[in-house]
Image: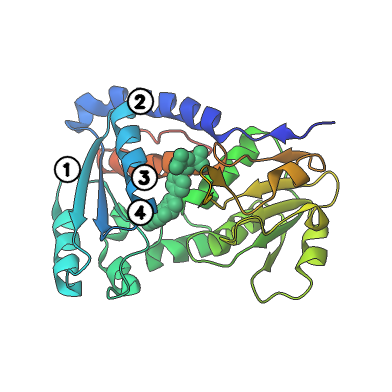
């Protein structure tokens, strides 16, 4: 039987419709639309595409986007000043520091400057702490998007053996925490794990966020597993691919996310949802898209 496709593009479009409605409904009371500021430093080529996608998505739902594009040779102090300005700007609800920043910038120090209540990416230490403790707060967008996709597909996580490949602060670690909070039994594997194939083959749910094109193949996947591919890479010959060799794994899987059209669009949607929720909170509006 063919694997179920976990269609991130479709779910993202549905959520955008609800978010657009929530904005329209709250606009009069709030007096202004939600504002998302994206701080981009230097010229990472992949970032250019993502920033453009975020701006387009804001326009589609009726949010305002503020873009600042700063030169790669900007000083740490000047960048922190820019962030302070965005923290103070009353039209801005969510701020995202597009990663990676140039090597001359200390991104940890930068993320500490961000107002945790404007943290659209959920990456401020306070928000990572809130996640660890299971408290309310903006959540890391990519793992939150994965959780929304699994929920929509009605794939139960209760008691399930889940393996997350990758331990980054941006994806792997928060993903593992969210899966645990959904009562999965979680293993984190990473670049130094021995017997990666064996560990992955034990998984009923395999989430791959290793950042290595084509790392995962049929040998890593047990029949009937749910496979979520967080990787996104530009092929030298053109087109995109993930960390999973889709053609090989798809016939084995119960459900699988494609690349593109899987996790990527959900990341953007969760960024908007975090921003919308912070806007709603500031204006005492009902929480948009509850239960996600
Ligand atoms: N502070 C920060 N937060 C991030 O969330 C963040 C970041 N920095 N730096 C870079 C990565 C990467 N990322 C993606 C966002 C959207 C798509 C996306 O929309 N993908 C589409 C296709 C995109 C295309 O066609 O190029 C898809 O998979 O279908 C992918 C990847 C967010 N990131």
Secondary element under disc 3, as helix, strand or loop, is helix
What percent of the width, then of the height, locates residue 63? 27, 33
Q: State the residue position of label 2.
A: 20
Lower sequence index among marks 4 and 2? 2
What percent of the width, then of the height, locates residue 92? 21, 46
Is mark 4 in CB contact (under 8 Å) with mark 1?
A: no
Specify whether tag 3 is near ligand 1 (CB below 8 Å): yes
Lower sequence index among marks 3 and 1? 3
Q: State the residue position of label 1.
A: 91
Cα separation, mark 2 vs mark 1, equals 18 Å
Judge the density around disc 2: few (<14), some (14-19), many (≥20) Cα neighbours within 10 Å. some
**Which mark lies nearer to you, 2 or 3?**
3
Cα separation, mark 3 vs mark 4, equals 7 Å
Depth order, front residue of 131/283: 131
Is mark 3 in CB contact (under 8 Å) with mark 4?
A: yes
Depth order, front residue of 76/31: 76
How many tags in the picture? 4
Q: Which mark is residue 45?
A: 4
**Which mark lies nearer to you, 4 or 2?**
4
Q: State the residue position of label 3.
A: 49
Tell me what residue is drawn at x 22 percent, y 65 percent.
Answer: 72
């Amino acid at each position: 039987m063919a694997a179920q496709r976990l269609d991130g593009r479709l779910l993202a479009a549905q959520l955008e419709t609800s978010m657009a409605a929530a904005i329209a409904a709250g606009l009069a009371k709030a007096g202004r639309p939600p504002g998302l500021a994206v701080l981009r430093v230097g010229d990472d080529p992949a970032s250019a595409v993502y920033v453009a996608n975020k701006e387009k998505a804001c326009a589609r739902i009726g949010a305002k986007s503020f873009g600042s594009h700063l030169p790669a040779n900007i000083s740490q102090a000047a960048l922190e000043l820019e962030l302070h300005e965005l923290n103070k700007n009353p039209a801005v609800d969510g701020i995202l520091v597009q990663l990676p920043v140039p090597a001359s910038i200390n991104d940890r120090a930068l993320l500490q400057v961000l107002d945790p209540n404007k943290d659209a990416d959920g990456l401020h230490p306070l928000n990572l702490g809130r996640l660890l403790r299971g408290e309310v707060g903006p959540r890391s967008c990519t793992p939150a998007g994965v959780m929304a996709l699994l929920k929509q597909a009605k794939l139960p996580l209760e008691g399930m053996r889940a393996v997350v490949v990758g331990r980054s602060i941006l994806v792997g670690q928060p993903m593992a925490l969210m899966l645990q909070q959904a009562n999965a039994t979680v293993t984190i594997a990473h670049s130094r794990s021995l017997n990666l194939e064996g560990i992955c083959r034990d998984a009923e749910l395999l989430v791959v966020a290793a950042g290595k094109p084509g790392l995962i193949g049929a040998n890593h996947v047990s029949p009937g597993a749910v496979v979520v591919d967080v990787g996104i890479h530009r092929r030298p010959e053109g087109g995109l691919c993930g960390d999973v060799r889709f053609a090989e794994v798809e016939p084995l899987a119960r459900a699988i996310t494609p690349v593109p059209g899987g996790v990527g669009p959900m990341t953007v949607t969760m960024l908007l949802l975090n921003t919308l929720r912070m806007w709603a909170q500031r204006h005492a509006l009902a929480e948009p898209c509850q239960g996600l």
